[in-house]
Amino acid sequence: MEEKKTIFSGVQPSGNITLGNYLGAIKNWIDLQENYNCIYAMMDMHAITVRQNPQELRKRTLDLLKIYIACGIDPEKSLLFIQSQVPAHAQLAWVLNCFTYMGELSRMTQFKDKCAKHADNINAGLFTYPVLMAADILLYQADLVPVGKDQMQHIEITRDIAQRFNALYSGEGKPVFTMPEGFLPKAGAKVMSLAEPTKKMSKSDENPKAYISILDDFNVIANKIKSAITDSEGVIEYRPDDDTKAGINNLLTIMSAVTGREIEKIAEEYSTKGYGDFKKDVAEAVVEEIRPIRTRYDELSGNKDYLMDICKKGAEEAGKIAGRTLSKVYKKVGFVM
Ligand code: TRP
């Protein structure tokens, strides 16, 4: 029997999990559980590359776990764990730091963006962020990494680092690291900001009207959608290459992602209707999608022991897998074992 391929991905608990995180990432991870060996982590070590409030980070990390489970990630099928609870991530990251060049790290788009945004805190962790991410992926010998487009450059550098290490140390034998591949899940919708629809919906946006949090009250969600920026043309049409239509394109994308219907079909259905009616229906569809997630989320909130147990078991299991890779690496580089 062919062995199942391994999938690894994760989200940083650095802000409110948005509708964009859900539709673009987490929702697509659910189906993968059936045919792959899935590992999904909470990336709290990445989160501290920008300043976090400690109480909030702790809370958000567990909130993220609840959201994963509430969205349908089954802890019996997938391995769930908190990055900082598995020391091998920091350990492998150090080794890989010594196999990554300053030049390649300084070319990373996300690094440049974050430097511009956090000019008062351009720390070394922000610079070596991609190396920690490479460690996350390579420790589990992941074959596939479902990520958004903005993370593809990080997958590329992970491959470069893996390739370099393998070329130096694998010799005739089996490569030390499996070469991972990034993939954009087909159904993964790229959800844009409701306030500036040419920008990606971001959980760290300063304007709370720009994003929908999975944990927003239902009437807040509806109001945010109703006040989403559109255009003055007054025509519901899907024109993905026309930036003046970015707002309507985005609402159509959201509607399609939550209903599973084709964008063109939805656009046709609303072609004679006004923006107000359309927004009302989008709001309703989004709320209906989130409602059962919220019910499960609230149930989990009352069950802290269960959550802590998942973290503990997850970290143990992840530690075993990661430890095997780390031992190989330590041997290869010449550490006394
Ligand atoms: N950098 C990713 C993001 O911001 C989060 C992340 C950290 C990640 N390590 C990872 C994603 C490993 C996939 C695999 O979205």
Image (cartoon, rainbow, N blue to C red):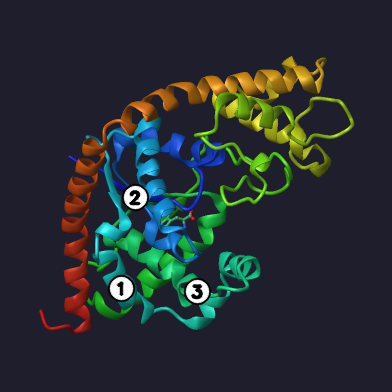
Q: Is residue 228 above or below residue 46?
A: above
Lower position in the chain sequence, tag 1 or tag 2: 2
Residue situated in front as seen by the camera: 129 or 102 = 129
The Cα–Cα distance between marks 1 and 2, rounded to whole angstroms, is 25 Å
- Percent x, y of residue 70: 37, 31
| Residue wearing tag 1 | 166
| Residue wearing tag 2 | 41
Q: Residues within 10 Å of mark 2 (few under 14, many from 20)?
A: many
Q: Quadrant of residue 293?
A: top left
Location of the N terminus by quadrant is: top left
| Residue wearing tag 3 | 127
- Percent x, y of residue 5: 29, 46
In the structure shown, which secondary structural element does the residue marked by tag 2 occupy?
A: strand
Amino acid type at mark 3: Phe
Q: Residues within 10 Å of mark 1 (few under 14, many from 20)?
A: some
Disc 1 to disc 3: CB gap under 8 Å: no
Residue 260 seen in this snapshot: no
In the structure shown, which secondary structural element does the residue marked by tag 1 occupy?
A: helix
Closest to the camera, between mark 1 and mark 2, is 2
Beta carbon of the mark 1 residue lies under 8 A of ligand 1: no
Amino acid type at mark 2: Ala
Is 131 situated left or right of 198 in this image? left
The Cα–Cα distance between marks 3 and 2, rounded to whole angstroms, is 21 Å
Residue at x-position 34% and y-position 60%? 136
Residue situated in front as seen by the camera: 224 or 149 = 224
Residue at x-position 19% and y-position 76%? 330
Residue situated in front as seen by the camera: 272 or 208 = 208
Disc 3 to disc 2: CB gap under 8 Å: no
* Residue 48: mark in rendering: none
- Percent x, y of residue 274: 82, 19
- Percent x, y of residue 137: 35, 59
Q: Is residue 68 above or below residue 218?
A: below
